[in-house]
Image: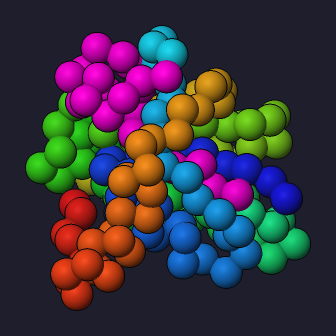
Amino acid sequence: MATATFAAGCFWGVEETFRKIPGVTGTTVGYTGGHFKEPTYRQVCAGDTGHAEAVRVDYDPDKVTYEQLLDVFWAAHDPTQVDRQGPDIGDQYRSAIFYHDAGQEAAAGASRARLEQSGALSRAIATRIEPAGPFWPAEEYHQRYIDKQRARTGVAPACH
């Protein structure tokens, strides 16, 4: 098993996207990339912690590669937006790849370079590529939030 960590705006939709991929064995939404220990959602939203809303993705590399997960990451959001995704504004919604080893760092950089060179984007990529640090799981009500709302109301909430 292996782990990848991505930030691409509101973590509810990002989790939903990765959770559906064959070979992904688990997802956890949480906070990372900041300086505050054990932050709460309220603290992260206040903008004082430096953390991004992120998704930790556990996966079986024999069934899905890190490079395939990177492709999903780029397609799941607008990597040219700085400190926001759609209507969600603040550095907690920034685009970031948090690598867990040198192989992931190299793959993330190469993937970003390919996207930049493809000409598919009209603006510069704002995505940060940073070493993974402590990851603080979000409160339970955020875990699989879209699934919970769909089960409760019959409708999945929109997320950027």
Residue sitting at x 48%, y 12%: 35
Q: Position of residue 30 (x, y in %)?
A: 48, 41
Would you say residue 75 sits in the magenta stretch? no
Residue sitting at x 59%, y 49%: 56
Give the vertical position of 109 relative to 20 (above or below).
above
Would you say residue 48 sits in the magenta stretch? yes
Q: Position of residue 21 (x, y in %)?
A: 60, 77
Region rendered in magenta: 38-58
Horizontally, residue 87 falls left or right of residue 45, namely left
Residue sitting at x 30%, y 39%: 93
What count of labels does the image hold?
Answer: 0
Q: Position of residue 71 (x, y in %)?
A: 56, 64
Residue situated in front as seen by the camera: 16 or 78: 16
Residue situated in front as seen by the camera: 32 or 130: 32
Q: Position of residue 129 (x, y in %)?
A: 56, 33
**Residue 135, picture quadrant:** top right
**Residue 76, picture quadrant:** bottom left
Residue sitting at x 80%, y 35%: 101
Placement of the N terminus among the 4 image quadrants = bottom right
Residue situated in front as seen by the camera: 122 or 19: 19
Placement of the C terminus among the 4 image quadrants = bottom left
Residue extending farthest to the left is 87
Horizontally, residue 143 falls left or right of residue 48, namely right
Is residue 119 visible in the rendered image? The answer is no
Give the vertical position of 143 relative to 81 (above or below).
below
Is residue 2 visible in the rendered image? The answer is yes
Horizontally, residue 109 falls left or right of residue 144, namely right
